[in-house]
Image: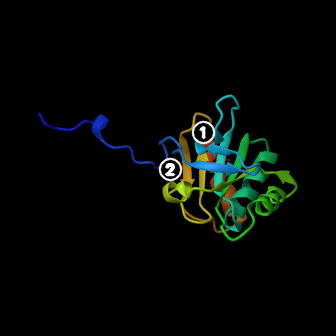
Amino acid sequence: TGRGTERDAPYVPTTAPGARLPHALLTDTDGRTVSTLDLCCCAAPELVLVLDGGRDGDAWADAAAFLAEQGASLRICRIQPHIHDVDDKQHREGQRDSCALNGTSTGAVFTDSTGQWGRIREVGPGGAILVRPDGHVAWRSLQQSASPEAAAAELRAAIAATLCLPAN
């Protein structure tokens, strides 16, 4: 009939809820290249919150640390843009220290050394993406939350909806 099928459609990376987290190459704090697909591990039944590496993601990171203290199985991965005018090793060491917020380890810091993540993430500075252990995007916020309290409420509701729990 000449009509194309869904199979014929080109793949377009997206972080829309329901889609699989798209692949992008990152660099960890030890200089190893990893994929965004490696951020989710089906062996560890935990949700992954993907954030900006800068201060814009702090409200989400604080909210996640608070919810983790309350028992949520949640890991944070902060992805920062590649900074060309700073010594990479020194920058990575500084970022390693910034992984602790409110005394709680908040996860790993990665660098978008190729710029791929910045082109496909579809969230602005301060946005957040919640990913299920199977690699599917459960929820996202396109922008920074109004406050740490608002971030905690939004994230709590997103986790509850993802895990089919009451939102209280």
The amino acid beneath tag 1 is Arg
Which residue type does callout 2 highlight?
Thr
Asked which secondary structure carries label 2, the reply is: loop
Q: Residue furthest bottom?
A: 85
- Asked if labels 1 and 2 touch by Cβ distance under 8 angstroms, the answer is no
The image quadrant where one finds the N terminus is: top left
User: Which residue corresponds to the image point at 88% horizontal and 55% vertical from the top-left?
Assistant: 103
Circle 1 sits on which residue? 132
> What residue is disc 2 on?
15
Q: Nearer the viewer, mark 2 or mark 1?
A: 2
Residue 38, quarter of picture: top right
Q: Position of residue 158 (x, y in %)?
A: 60, 48
Q: Is residue 101 visible?
A: no
In-front residue for pair 154/46: 46
Nearer to me, 117 or 106: 117
**Mark 2 vs 1, N-terminal side:** 2
Q: Percent position (x, y) of residue 97? A: 84, 58
